[in-house]
């Protein structure tokens, strides 16, 4: 997901994106344990996207509190 796209999102939108990514990561873990995982590289992509979303959430929260 591009950086500019994340900057334009609101706090609520970022939080819903974060929740959906966390659910997807959990589903991937279940698939891995069952031996049904098709794209193991998706773990790496999700981990980085979650980190990006958390970064922008922290930035927006600091701006709100300042």
Image: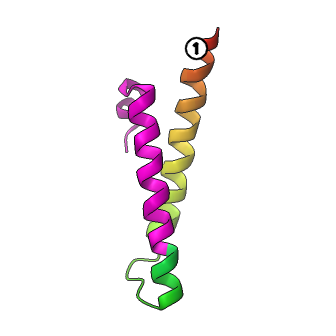
Residue 46, percent from left and from top: 48, 58
Against 23, is 27 above or below? below
Say which residue appears at 49% left-offset and 78% top-offset.
30
Magenta stretch, residue numbers: 1-28
Q: Is residue 41 visible?
A: no
Residue 10, percent from left and from top: 40, 25
According to the picture, the residue beneath numbered tag 1 turns out to be 63
Instruction: Farthest residue to the top: give it.
Output: 66
Against 5, is 38 above or below? below
Q: Secondary structure at mark 1?
A: helix
Say which residue appears at 36% left-offset and 24% top-offset.
8
| Along the viewing direction, whichever of 4 and 38 lies nearer the viewer | 38
Magenta span includes 44: no
| Along the viewing direction, whichever of 1 and 58 lies nearer the viewer | 58
- Around disc 1, counting alpha carbons within 10 Å, would you say few (fewer than 14), some (14 to 19), or many (20 or more)? few
Against 63, is 55 above or below? below
Residue 57, percent from left and from top: 54, 31
């Amino acid at each position: 997901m591009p950086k500019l796209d994340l900057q334009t999102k609101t706090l609520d939108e970022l939080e819903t994106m974060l929740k959906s990514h966390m659910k997807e990561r959990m589903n991937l873990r279940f698939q891995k344990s069952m031996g049904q995982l098709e794209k193991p590289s998706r773990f790496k992509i999700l981990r980085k996207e979650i980190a990006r979303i958390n970064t922008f959430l922290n930035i927006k929260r600091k701006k709100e509190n300042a």
